[in-house]
Amino acid sequence: MSSPYAAPIVGWYQRNARDLPWRRPDASPWSILVSEIMLQQTQVARVLPAHAAWLERWPTPRALADATPGDAVRQWGRLGYPRRAIRLHATAGELVAKHNGQVPSDAATLAQLPGVGSYTAAAVASFAFGQREPVLDTNVRRVLGRLIAGEATPRQATSAAERRMAEQLLPQDGRQAARWSVAVMELGALICSATSPNCQQCPVADRCRWKQAGSPPAPPHRPGVRYQGTDRQCRGALLAVLRATPGAVTPDDLAAAWPEAEQRTRSLASLAADGLVAELPDGSLTLPTASA
């Protein structure tokens, strides 16, 4: 590894890494793909039980493809952003139809799967197959931004300059590159956090440009969007009823879950547009039983 940061960061990772199932040597590419989809905008602690239950029920893409999209949404539970369940089900179908039920090893092919963006494609190619791909999640971007550029927090969108910097720091060997990427990711999650970085425990604090500059604060953070009373909360309440009901539900059942009629109608329409709800001829509603 030629980077002066690689040895201390990877050494720190080997001593401090969390034991996560998708990082174990026997983790399948499917397990790693499922974990990356689940970890989008969701904390590790919430993903751990959901990932274990998902793999127990559907240990292969073919097993999930044989289920219905509604089964996937029901199993997804309250993990959040349930469109991910629909896309993961669609991905399983494509893996069976186009890739003999196997997860492809190259990032370009992975990026063509439903709901798999450039980050997820790079992460799966790297962590599952040892491909030399820069893996730039928020944690990695924050660590590299502080360490190399002296910036407190990364910008909202990944820049071309960030990608070049990450590419330059990657070891040439694919497996070493994967180890470097996961080590930087873990450092960002456990030490170089967004709000409370523990610089005393950082293995590269002595060469961090952000720390050398006096750890200047980030620009003011825009307040997050409230959840209470939003269409997102309404969608969640309606889906909870559908998940808890083996068959169809009536409009009255949903009215009991969310009394405000206009918002309920609007949210149901958005759920249907996302493929999360299907309407039967008699006007009752179910989780989807067939792929869109």
Image (tube, rainbow, N blue to C red):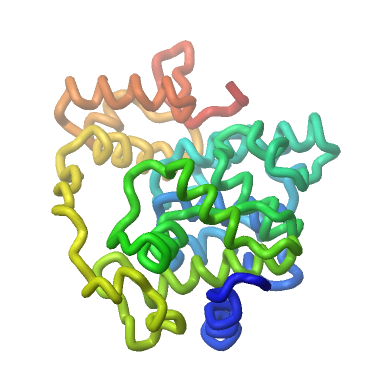
- How many marks do you count on the picture? 0
Residue at the image point whose x is 44% and y is 26% from the top: 274
Residue at the image point whose x is 50% and y is 44% from the top: 74
| Side of 284 relative to 259 (left or right) | right
Q: Position of residue 50 (x, y in %)?
A: 52, 59
**Where is 280 relative to 164, above or below?**
above
Q: Quadrant of the N terminus?
A: bottom right
Which residue is nearer to you in this view: 99 or 261?
A: 99
Which residue is nearer to you in this view: 204 or 247?
A: 204
Residue 65 visible, this angle: yes
Residue at the image point whose x is 74% and y is 72% from the top: 25
Q: Position of residue 54 (x, y in %)?
A: 60, 55
| Side of 130 relative to 135 (left or right) | right
Residue at the image point whose x is 26% and y is 21% from the top: 266
**Where is 196 relative to 89, above or below?**
below
**Where is 66 relative to 5, above or below?**
above
Q: Position of residue 207 (x, y in %)?
A: 41, 78
Residue 58 visible, this angle: no
In this view, the residue farthest toward the top is: 281
In this view, the residue farthest toward the right is: 100
Which residue is nearer to you in this view: 30 or 263?
A: 30
- Which of the 4 quarters of the picture holds residue 262? top left
- Which of the 4 quarters of the picture holds residue 175? bottom right
Q: Quadrant of the C terminus?
A: top right
Which residue is nearer to you in this view: 122 or 212?
A: 212
| Side of 181 relative to 266 (left or right) | right
